Image (cartoon, grey):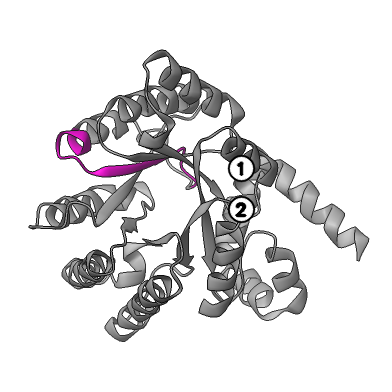
Amino acid sequence: MSLMRSAFIALSRNRPMRRFSERSSIGSKLSSRFVAGVEIEDALRVAKQVNGQGISVTLDSLGESVTTEAEAHRSADVYHRLLDEIAARKLNSNISVKLTQMGLTQDPALAERIATSLARHARATQNFLRIDMEDSSLTQVTLDIVRRLHAQPDMHDAIGIVIQSYLYRSQSDVELLLSEGIRVRLCKGAYKEPAEVAFPKKSDVDKNYIRLSRMLLASSTYHGLATHDEKMIAAAKSFASQNAIDPSRFEFQMLFGVRRDLQRKLVDEGYNVRVYIPFGREWYPYFMRRLAERPANVFFIAKQLLRK
């Protein structure tokens, strides 16, 4: 892990810096490249704009671990409102949820009840709930909850999960998920993990990403490949072409504000593209992880600031 990446990961956990940034106008201005805004209406407005470019979206209300049951239910209420508004406005959008926002670290049973309610609401509105993956300490409990929900009658098309290619365990997890027909979003992973559980070298993370993406593409289930890495995208396109896998059977996923040129290029080439659109007042940890993932983002932000 580079020094810059380590520094931004450390900053993402710095509470005084977070409090200052989330309350300052300059912080909000800088984050606007990657965050749609702080209110539901901001996210819905941006979703409509992105849909207008032929790109589907997934909406994420930012915020991670909650400390009380009341906070967990308030977080869930935002997503229930989103599902209703998506249906009412006929947006091409689904939702992404972190289980720590639903009380996972305090009460896993509470998080599972809330996730069940959201999945049922998604099914009722002909939508889809993606459960995000967090750090490796929560991988197993997250998988267990998603598998139990997916196993419920009529829930198969309503819920999916995220797998991170930097974890050693991910190949066996993908094999299990494929055997159960669970939809997967594959990403590289954005948390700092020990070498005991994750590949330390980027080259090994990339190799595993390609290996896992091929497993997903070869399956009959619709999956998402989340990456801005053109080498990973080229490898997926090549494998799909060589194996007569139609582009309609999968989608590429990218982050709001990152590689817009590549998003448009893929759409023009006939691929399905989905953009992950975050919003909310608790944007700071997410913003710092985006800077950690891609140093070019740092220089872009600096250039924008100097223009003001």
- Which secondary structure, mark 1? helix
Check residue 179 for magenta coloring. Answer: yes
Q: Residues within 10 Å of mark 2 (few under 14, many from 20)?
A: few
Q: Is residue 288 above or below residue 176?
A: below
Q: Is residue 242 above or below residue 151?
A: above
Q: Position of residue 277 (x, y in %)?
A: 53, 60
Q: Nearest the camera: 69 or 116?
A: 116
Q: Nearest the camera: 125 or 169?
A: 125
Residue on which disc 1 sits: 263
Pointer 2 and pointer 1: residues touching (CB < 8 Å)? yes
Does residue 278 appear in the picture of this structure?
yes
Residue on which disc 2 sits: 53
Residue plotted at (66% across, 43% down): 259
Residue plotted at (59% across, 58% down): 52
Q: Nearest the camera: 250 or 208?
A: 250
Q: Is residue 57 above or below residue 192?
A: below
Q: How many marks?
A: 2
**Residue lying furthest top in this view?**
242
**Quadrant location of residue 127?**
bottom left
**Type of residue at label 1?**
Gln
**Type of residue at label 2?**
Gln
Q: Distance between the Cα atoms at labels 2 and 1?
A: 10 Å
Residue plotted at (75% across, 78% down): 25
Q: Nearest the camera: 14 or 125?
A: 125
- Which secondary structure, mark 2? loop
**Quadrant location of residue 5?**
top right
Q: Earlier in the sequence, mark 2 or mark 1?
A: 2
